[in-house]
Amino acid sequence: MAEKNSKIRFGLLDAVILIAVIALVLALVFRYSADKHLFVYDTETYTVTVKATGLQYTTVNMLDSNAKVYLEDGKLIGTFVHAPTVTPMLSYSTTSSGDIIAAYYPDNTLVDIVTDIECELIVNDGMIMTKGGVHVAVGTVIKIHTETVDLDVEIVAVEKNASN
Amino acid sequence: MNEQINNEIIKTPKVKKPKTKRERSPRANRFNFIDAIIIICIVSVLALLYFVYSPLELLGIGTKETNIIYTIKVSGVPSEYASAINTGDVLSDGDGYILGTVASEVEIEPHSIYEYRENEFGSGGIVSMTHPDLVDLIITVSATSEKSADGYRVDGKRIAVEAEYHLLLPKFESKGICISLSEENVREGGAS
């Protein structure tokens, strides 16, 4: 009987295999918890209005309606709802009398754009965020990109779509 | 007498059982500490790679090799600098990425500066003025990129319009902004 027990002894190899399996399981859980907010989340469709300033005027031609929009880490965040609204870049200057006034750059130089991105976002404890955990709130500056253009944008509005 | 016999019995050597194969060569198959460390390291690295990259990215699935042409504008430099950039020069950046080769002769454009100017009525606006000495250089670069869903990467570095790059050429070094990008056979969009 004693001999039989010794055959099923727990050895170093078993411990290592156990540790390896646990490490693998933890890695999987960690990956999916980062991606999917601990497996359980409900996304809602939001329209996020963003503003980018000081772009080359030629860049606007590359921001197509329906273009896919990605975060800096390459994760898809949504799509442009429409082509951007373009205005000459706004700058504030001081007049000779000391007043601060708004002035626009000449045409075909630098521009500001405002556009809408339709996003699937998570709401957690009242905080709106992407599936990757990036906080989506008015005033936040985030780096986004399309296939061909990189943009630093400021979020100026976040609206839940009526269809939700 | 009995005591003597007992002592003899005690001193009798035990009969040894024949050794098994494993017992005969204990070092041959023994799993040691180093093996454990190696396995843990391999598993950790695999887990880390799995977390950082998706399995598809690790296998290179979802990317396509594509030739691209992009232009980079270097603003406000003396026009003589253009002669330091030659067709065929290899372009790299400060981090060691090879970003492509200069595809054509450098274009020289006037360098504009913008300033608020008031008119005689006290109102005004921002006007563009051409700098008398400095110019903008437009460098056209050709490269083979990995195209994925979210864009183009050359030697692992993302190439995109509005992105700033540290430009390292054999005889020239500066910073520039990408102003256009297209696939080599399908030129579209971007600055002129």
Image (cartoon, coloured by chain):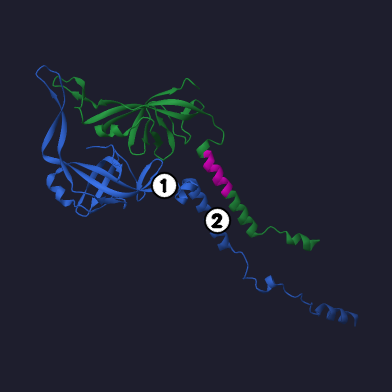
Chain colours: A green, B blue
Q: Residue at x 87, y 82 (%)?
A: B4
Residue B164 in magenta? no
Give yes or no for residue A31 being in the magenta stretch: yes
Q: Is residue B147 above or below residue A85?
A: below
Q: Could you give the CA–CA distance between mark 2 and mark 1, rounded to whole angstroms?
A: 31 Å
At 50% across and 38% down in the image, what residue appears?
A35
Residue farthest toward the top in the current orientation of the protein: B121
Residue B172 at x, y = what percent?
A: 20, 51
Q: Which residue is mark 1?
A: B63
Q: Tell me which amino acid carries mark 1.
A: Thr
Q: Which residue is mark 2?
A: B40
- Position of the N terminus of chain B, as image quadrant, is bottom right
Name which quarter of the figure residue B72 lies in: top left
- The residue carrying pointer 2 sits among few (fewer than 14), some (14 to 19) or many (20 or more) residues within 10 Å by Cα, namely some
**Rendered position, B76 above or below B22:** above
**In this orientation, which residue lies closer to the viewer: A99 or B173?**
B173
Check disc 1: other Cα within 10 Å, few if <14, some if 14-19, many if 20+: some
The mark that comes first in sequence, 2 or 1, is 2
Indicate left or right for B106 with A114 as reference: left
The segment highlighted magenta reads A24-33
Say what secondary structure mark 2 lies in. helix
When asked about the image quadrant of residue B23, the answer is bottom right
On screen, residue B131 versus residue A35, left or right, reads left
Residue B79 vs residue A126: left or right? left
Task: Indicate the position of residue A46 as horizontal and vertical percent values.
Answer: 45, 25
